[in-house]
Amino acid sequence: CRFQNQQILSLRSIYSISQILFSDKTFCQESQRFYKKALHFDLKRAILDCNNDLKRSRTMDCLFCAIADGNIPSKKLYEDDKILAFYDIAPQAPIHILVIPKKHIASVQEITPQNSEIISYIFERIPAIAQKAGITNGYRVISNCGEDACQSVKHLHFHILGGGKLSDQMA
């Protein structure tokens, strides 16, 4: 992660300070215990911060994570704390909406028992999202998974296509 070197330096600084403090005989035992606890807390916090930065860095280059975070604008149709629905910038149908989980999951291939709840959550909301978009006479829900399926953004997403008669060539 880009902050990792800075945090490693911070960890080394904290470690160096602790070595000096605990080798100095002028500090009483009680002061040493206090500083030891404080340094231990700072070390744990620095390690947790670094781990969080590493997790974020894996998704910082994800277009849909940036859209979900609000760093890239989108024409939002629906949003709550778990998902975001927005209009596709290159529509393949008269109405073309993308629905994404805000938490990064790369594709259908990465759905697990630990994260599968978000999938049912998305599908429970798709009918209301389609209705809000003005789709009244049916729609298609698609998720491309992997290179052969032409998944262009490696973040799980569902296309809602509608607003007119769709081709019967794909499904």
Image: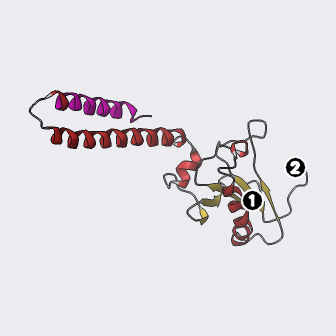
Q: Nearer the viewer, residue 1 or 49?
A: 49
Mark 1 — residue? 160
Q: Quadrant of the N terminus?
A: top left
On screen, residue 166 versus residue 84, left or right, reads: right
Image mark for residue 170: 2
Q: Amino acid at mark 2?
A: Met
Does residue 78 belong to the magenta stretch? no
Comes first in the chain, label 1 or label 2: 1
Nearer-the-camera pick, 44 or 171: 44
- Residue 45 in the image: state x and y as whole percent: 36, 43
For residue 13: magenta? yes
Location of residue 120 (image quadrant): bottom right
Q: Residue 25: x, y in percent? A: 11, 29
* Residue under the image location 27 percent in, 39 percent down: 39
Residue 34 to residue 167: above or below: above
Q: Which residues are magenta?
A: 2-21
Q: Is residue 30 left or right of residue 133?
A: left
Of all residues, the one furthest to the left in this rendering is 26
Distance Cα–Cα, label 1 vs label 2:
14 Å
Residue 72, percent from left and from top: 52, 52
Residue placed most toward the observer, 115 or 145: 115
For disc 1, the neighbor class at 10 Å (few under 14, some 14 to 19, many from 20) is many
Other-residue count near label 2 (Cα within 10 Å), few / some / many at <14 / 14–19 / ≥20: few
* Near-viewer residue (101 or 88): 101
The disc placed on residue 52 is none
At mark 2, the secondary structure is: loop
Q: Main secondary structure of the magenta part?
A: helix
* Circle 1: element type: strand
